[in-house]
Image: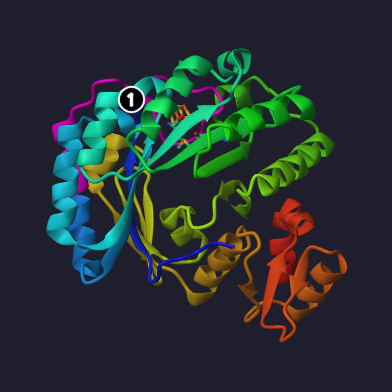
Amino acid sequence: MHSIKKPLFGIYLHWPYCLSKCPYCDFFSHPCSAPNEDILLAGYIRDLKQMANLTNTRTLTSIFLGGGTPSLMSPSFIEKIMQAITNQFHLSEDVEITIEANPDAITLDKMRDFANLGINRLSIGVQALNDSDLLFLGRRHSVKTALTRIEEAKSVFARINMDLIYARPNQTLKQWENELQNALSLELEHYSLYQLTIEENTVFGQKNISTVDEKTAEQLYRLTDQIMTNADIPSYEVSNYAKVGEESQHNLIYWTGGNYLGIGPAAHGRIGLTASTSPKSVDKWIKEGISLEQLTPQERFEEYVLMGLRLTHTPFPTQGLSQNGIQKALKLGWITQSDNKKTITPTLDGTLMLNELILTVLS
Ligand SMILES: C[S@@+](CC[C@H](N)C(=O)[O-])C[C@H]1O[C@@H](n2cnc3c(N)ncnc32)[C@H](O)[C@@H]1O
Ligand code: SF4
């Protein structure tokens, strides 16, 4: 179950560059250490102004600087972005401002600069806590560097998330358990724990790398759930675990069907039935900017179901769902239903069969 400070409204800003491209990653990002920040800034400010015309009466509850590797942005660049945002929008008093960072693309000084600019949450991509798997994942940092950055981050930020990727080829339950216990010993507020997926357009996809088999993947997921629950950092979404009250307010917007702006190349946004998209090319984005499209209520509803059932331990309204589908999912043990039948809640078995569960309740 999550805690939401309502109503949520956020800005996602996409930074499209990394120091190098990881072989598993399908996010829109290119290797580049010194891009032309002036050209990019003009694009971000244009997007912000365009979207502010539609939404600037709303109070911003979160800003998420994602990527790519946004910790590569210079503090002066972020200062200009923040200025542009505050010129256009009213920020809530407890606005959550997150930046994603790679252990090899941030320093303690930079963390302090970011915090001075109002950034109050750091999401650091560690991916593995053993050096041979970091090498396999094409990461540029060692475990030691990652742990040092986290210790430094703890001296600056009160809210930290760490990303890990598990279900790596040949990973055993015991190995993952040890790694996860090491991650928990860092005592962070939030953990994003993703099972490795092999995406077609990546080096791993082209090399036909395979992950663990289905049965091991399920065992790893159940083990993760058990370890995190025992540590009082339960799941609140399929891959996200947090201490109570430390859930990402920004990501909750996506999973609760809320409104957010998507700024920058490849970013997308939702304002009611209006969907915004931007080209997956920096040059094209600079030239063309954001396109808007109207969704049908049915399309938006299906998105809402698709995202909402990702939330764990969280009742989801049954209105608009298939009654037959609900009965079938109940029989299969994928959901529980409230006594008044107004909500369903996915069980762990249901979360493990999420795609099938969604199709069933929409059928
Ligand atoms: C947008 S990336 C940005 C993080 C940051 N650039 C980094 O690499 O540390 C967000 C997270 O998605 C996860 N991720 C990316 N590709 C993945 C894949 N193929 N399978 C599982 N997780 C993946 C990684 O944990 C990564 O940290
Ligand atoms: S995982 Fe992170 S650093 Fe690696 S390519 Fe993707 S966004 Fe860049």
- Magenta range: 20-45
Q: Residues within 10 Å of mark 1 (few under 14, many from 20)?
A: some
In the image, 357: left or right of 135? right
Image quadrant holding the C terminus, namely: bottom right
Q: Going 47% across and 22% down the picture, which residue do you hit?
A: 146
- Judge whether residue 42 can be spotted in this image: no
In front here: 154 or 67? Answer: 154
Coordinates of residue 204 in the picture (x, y in percent): 61, 23
Answer with the quarter of the image where residue 184 lies.
top right
Looking at the rendered structure, the kind of residue marked 1 is: Ile
In the image, 70: left or right of 239? left
Q: Can you name the residue that lies furthest to the right here?
A: 331
Image quadrant holding the N terminus, namely: bottom right
Q: Can you name the residue that lies furthest to the bottom here?
A: 340
Coordinates of residue 48 in the picture (x, y in percent): 21, 54
As helix, strand or loop, the secondary structure at mark 1 comes to loop
Q: Which residue is mark 1?
A: 106
